[in-house]
Image (cartoon, grey):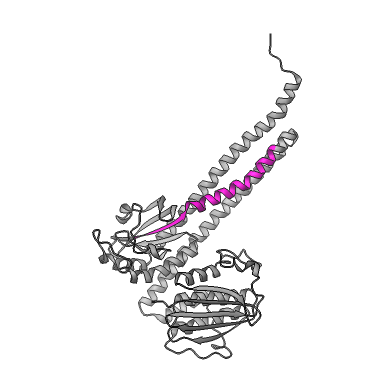
Amino acid sequence: MPFTMRPSAVRLVLLVLPSVVTLAALSATGAVALALQERTIREATGERVLEVASSLADLPEVRETVGAVTAKGSPAALAGADDLAEATAVLQPIADLVGEAAGVYYVVITDDEGVRITHPLAAERGVQVETANASVLAGETFTGTEIGASGPSLRAKVPVRDAAGQPVGMVAVGVLESEIASELDAAVRALLPWAVGALLVATLAASVLTATVERRFRRLDVIAAEHAQMRRTTVALREQSHEFSTRLHVIHGLVSRGDVDEARGYIEEIAAVRRPVDAGGAGDEPVPDDLPVLAAMTQTVRTELSDLGARVRFDLAVEFDVDEGVVSVVANLCRNAAEAGAATVVCALRNADDRIVGSVDDDGPGVEPRIAARIFVPGFTSKTDASVWGRGLGLDVVWRIVTARGGSVEVGLSALGGARFAFELERAG
């Protein structure tokens, strides 16, 4: 007796089949898209950390400083944080700057026994790294995922070589696997609503199946375009990194030969440096000649704020010159005030024993209480054009510097009507 299906069964199959086909197609498409997404993210991240590590390991300052500490320890008696303190003072600012600029989780530089000279956490400096590094310290390059003190991370390790080409340490740059997973989760969340919607539409009406699949392909086109843009951005950033490294080498060479005027001219040419018409502000006292960094900071901040349409007045009562960390804090706070719309900015700076106390007041729109707790979060910005690269990083840099030096920063209402940022931090040793 031949098998026959009832019309109701045929109708049921025709009703369910489009949904099954759609579900299968969407599952396969989603799996491929997620696989491509994960591979693209990993490849881009791997290239980024390797490029950052290689560029940093080739810097003359890094090679000379790391090479100078090889005698501080041995495999039987490892160097400690105190032994490496001078090298840390030189290399930690470089590592912090490179890490912030490249958007990586950590930048670690070690000696020839794998003892950390730099680390984002002060407690980890002077401690030998946990992961295997014999091959890197022997001269090989490593890229892959390892589990360290901060958890699993995709990292690149590059040997640091002395003038003779012998490995004297290494540079390790990493991005946490949790950050990569977060990017992948975001892609899943972006695709999930579309997949569910397509399944419901196909189940209710088979006639919309073609349109639904077409929307899926359009979504994949958008993802492909985003990937292409990511690749173009990665290439552009790599080219900028090479160009920046080349310029640093030129400046280093000019300074090393004592060609200070030529170095200054070269910097002014590539950075479009402009000198202020008036080197002082109303009510400002002249900066003593024995405080050259402080004098340069006030001039630079005044010039930058003038370009932004603001005026700055300094109230200085310090007996010693400032360091790069204080310069970064003051410059970022003053720039933030001007970019927020302030016309007048007042910066006060004084020393109290071994601490530096300062404040930046402005007459701008101020900081709304509802966002005051978030303004120091990396990437947060209240400015209208948040697409500009670097927006949302200045206050995070301030927070990192003052907290790393046992200090604090607070935001409140200024007597000028705008915002007031008060900060204090330890004097650099």
**286 shown above or below 93:** below
Magenta region includes residue 175: yes
- Image-quadrant location for residue 174: bottom left
Residue 49 higher or lower than 421, as above or below: above
Q: How many marks?
A: 0
User: Which secondary structure class fits the magenta region best?
Assistant: helix
Magenta stretch: residue 257 in it?
no
Q: In the image shown, does 62 or 325 lie closer to the viewer?
A: 325
**Which corner quadrant holds the C terminus?**
bottom left
Residue sitting at the far top? 1
Question: Does residue 17 sit above or below 294 in this rendering?
Answer: above
- Residue 160 location, x and y as percent? 34, 61
Magenta segment: 170-199
Q: Residue at x 46, y 83 (%)?
A: 351
Residue 190 horizontal/vertical position (percent): 63, 48
Which residue occupies 40% across, 81% down?
A: 260
State the image coordinates of residue 43 (x, y, percent, origin top left).
Answer: 48, 50
Taking depth in this image into account, of 100 and 218 the one nearest to the observer is 100
In the picture provided, is 5 more to the left or to the right than 150? Answer: right
Quadrant of res 32: top right
Residue 95 x/y as whole percent: 42, 65
Quarter holding the N terminus is: top right
Query: In this view of the protein, which residue sits in the foreground, 346 or 127?
Result: 127
* Left or right: 232, with 325 as reference point: right
Left or right of 354? Residue 364 is right
